[in-house]
Image (spheres, coloured by chain):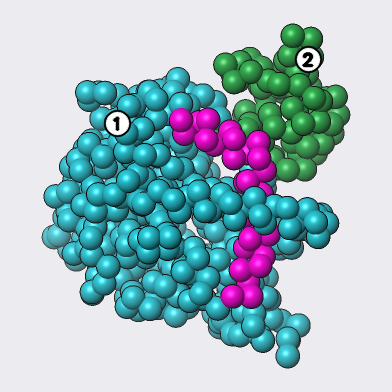
């Protein structure tokens, strides 16, 4: 029976829930993501707690639990408050290292709640950490949620229905069917190229670790200029993906196969829209290239851009919505197999990737306090055991690499990151 | 043509509190039109107006405002 307070998963919520279950089944905490904002001073923590209370009052989903409703899953409100959890850096320790250690301690602990908020106090400022479970909301939703917590006008944030359900409702049955088969053919093509992976390990106890690369304004502008030169106005994301493929190929992939396949999200949210706050409103696209294509830098970008254009031209960006819609009726384990496994039985994704875009708070800051730095993190399945999250803070590019240890070798990753940096800035051999 | 483009942009790609107040020369990139949005906009225009917009001409001068888009589409239609 469905209670009025229950909120059924939308097709993209279920898609992310399936991956959350894969991560939990492998002994890790689940499909959690985190935004860590370094603040120049402590914000008003009492005001922040009051805003968290308002969040639960306005959006009961924020502290809900997941329950089954027939074959479907739903958020069921509990009304529990979300306490602002406070932590303190050890006095005398290097604050950057200590903050990173605390961030990862918190992120690695077993968790069942969909949303937790932490304040890690340093000597002057500190770090605000927002951790959410991916079925609850997508990364753009994470930014909107932080905006809600910091806004002078929280009443302007309203919930609205699923953009995916709205899109699906626009299409006739035949249109959905046509798109479904398009997506299926696209999947078959993606499955035909065995993916190189960052590790050969497929199981065993793992902890999540993080490496963050921050580029200054000049470097970020140079990268943006090169992205425009190689992939045009339409392909900044593709530039990051291409550079990463090349970095992995140049260093040498630990599990060497035929090529690279990197899924990346297609967002249905309009840019700058303050709603919806919760729910996932994303589809999925794939960047694919053979190892030969990856070795030719200029040719790779042309290939990725042409592939991407063809995908949009063929409406494949939208074709995943009917596929996800039908996936809702599959068990998590069966759906996961379709999502992850290639025909050969190998893992499809060479890397988990998301370009979250601009995460700036401007002069107003977060609750009036300037945001001086940023790092992002997320759990992922093993393999690939590696995720890259790209974002911009005040015009500066931030690349956050989350990885599973010991599955992904740290020295190998350091070499990949160094090569990635020179690929992005075009300072290496090409 | 501009009305159709404007309706698509503000229904699907960019949130604006008052789309009616958005001028034909206002900057779409500053308003939030991102790389994926540009691609979807171009595909919409090609399908809706039966033109082919050359990849080599995808630049701020052609997609920066409703007026520049309008000129680009008309020019490409005549080519």
SS category of the residue bearing label 1? helix
Image coordinates of residue A97 in percent, x first then y, are 19, 56
Looking at the magenta stretch, what is its main secondary structure? Answer: helix
Element type where label 2 sits in the image: helix
Which quarter of the figure has residue B44? top right
Counting from the top left corner in percent of width and height, residue A90 is at 19, 66
Question: Which chain is rendered green in the image?
Answer: B
Give the quarter of the figure containing the C terminus of chain A: top left
Identify which residue is drawn at 39% across, 30% down. Answer: A300
Horizontal and vertical percent for residue A236?
Answer: 48, 33
**Residue at horizontal 77%, vertical 31%?**
B47
Left or right of residue A94, residue B42 in this image: right
The chain shown in cyan is which?
A
Bounds of the magenta span? Answer: A303-330
Write down the residue under mark 1. A295
- Reading the image, the residue beneath label 2 is B77
Q: Residues within 10 Å of mark 1 (few under 14, many from 20)?
A: some
Image location (x, y in percent) of residue A148: 60, 58
């Amino acid at each position: 029976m469905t209670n009025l307070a229950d909120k059924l998963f939308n097709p993209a919520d279920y898609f992310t829930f399936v991956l959350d279950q894969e991560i939990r089944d492998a002994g890790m905490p689940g499909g959690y993501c985190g935004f860590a904002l370094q603040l120049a001073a402590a914000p008003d923590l009492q005001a922040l707690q009051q805003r968290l209370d308002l969040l639960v009052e306005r959006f009961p989903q924020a502290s809900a639990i997941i329950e089954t409703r027939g074959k479907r899953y739903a958020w069921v409100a509990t009304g529990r408050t979300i306490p602002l959890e406070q932590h303190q850096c050890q006095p005398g320790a290097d604050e950057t290292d200590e903050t990173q250690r605390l961030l990862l301690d918190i992120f690695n602990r077993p968790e069942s709640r969909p949303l937790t908020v932490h304040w890690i106090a340093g000597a002057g400022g500190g770090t605000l950490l927002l951790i959410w479970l991916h079925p609850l909301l997508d990364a753009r939703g994470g930014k909107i949620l932080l905006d809600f917590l910091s806004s002078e006008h929280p009443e302007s944030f309203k919930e609205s229905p699923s953009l995916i359900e709205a899109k699906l409702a626009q299409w006739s049955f035949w249109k959905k069917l046509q798109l479904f088969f398009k997506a299926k053919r696209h999947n078959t093509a993606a499955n035909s190229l065995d993916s190189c992976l960052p590790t050969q390990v497929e199981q065993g106890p793992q902890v999540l670790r993080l490496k963050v690369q921050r580029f200054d304004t000049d470097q970020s502008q140079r990268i943006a200029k090169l992205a425009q030169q190689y992939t045009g106005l339409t392909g900044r994301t593709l530039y990051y993906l291409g550079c990463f493929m090349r970095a992995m190929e140049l260093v040498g992939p630990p599990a060497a196969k035929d090529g690279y396949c990197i899924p990346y999200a297609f967002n249905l949210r309009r840019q700058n829209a303050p709603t919806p706050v919760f729910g996932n409103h994303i589809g999925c696209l794939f960047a694919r290239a053979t190892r030969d294509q990856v070795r030719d830098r200029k040719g790779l970008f042309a290939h990725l851009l042409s592939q991407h254009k063809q995908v949009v031209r063929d409406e494949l960006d939208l074709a995943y919505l009917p596929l996800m819609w039908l996936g809702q009726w599959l068990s998590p384990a069966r759906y996961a197999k379709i999502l992850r496994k290639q025909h050969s039985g190998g893992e499809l994704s060479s890397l988990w990737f998301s370009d979250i875009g601009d995460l700036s708070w401007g002069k107003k800051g977060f609750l009036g306090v300037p945001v001086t730095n940023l790092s992002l993190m997320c759990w992922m399945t093993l393999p690939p055991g590696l995720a890259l999250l790209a974002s911009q803070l005040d015009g500066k590019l931030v690349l956050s690499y989350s990885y599973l240890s010991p599955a992904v070798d740290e020295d190998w990753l350091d070499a990949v990151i160094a090569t990635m940096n020179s690929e992005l800035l075009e300072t290496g051999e090409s | 043509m501009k009305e159709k483009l404007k309706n698509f942009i503000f229904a699907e790609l960019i949130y604006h509190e008052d789309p009616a107040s958005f001028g034909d020369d206002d900057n779409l990139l500053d308003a939030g039109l991102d790389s994926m949005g540009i691609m979807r906009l171009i595909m919409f225009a090609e399908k809706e107006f039966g033109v082919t917009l050359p990849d080599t001409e995808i630049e701020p001068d052609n997609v920066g405002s409703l007026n520049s888009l309008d000129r680009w589409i008309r020019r490409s239609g005549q080519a």
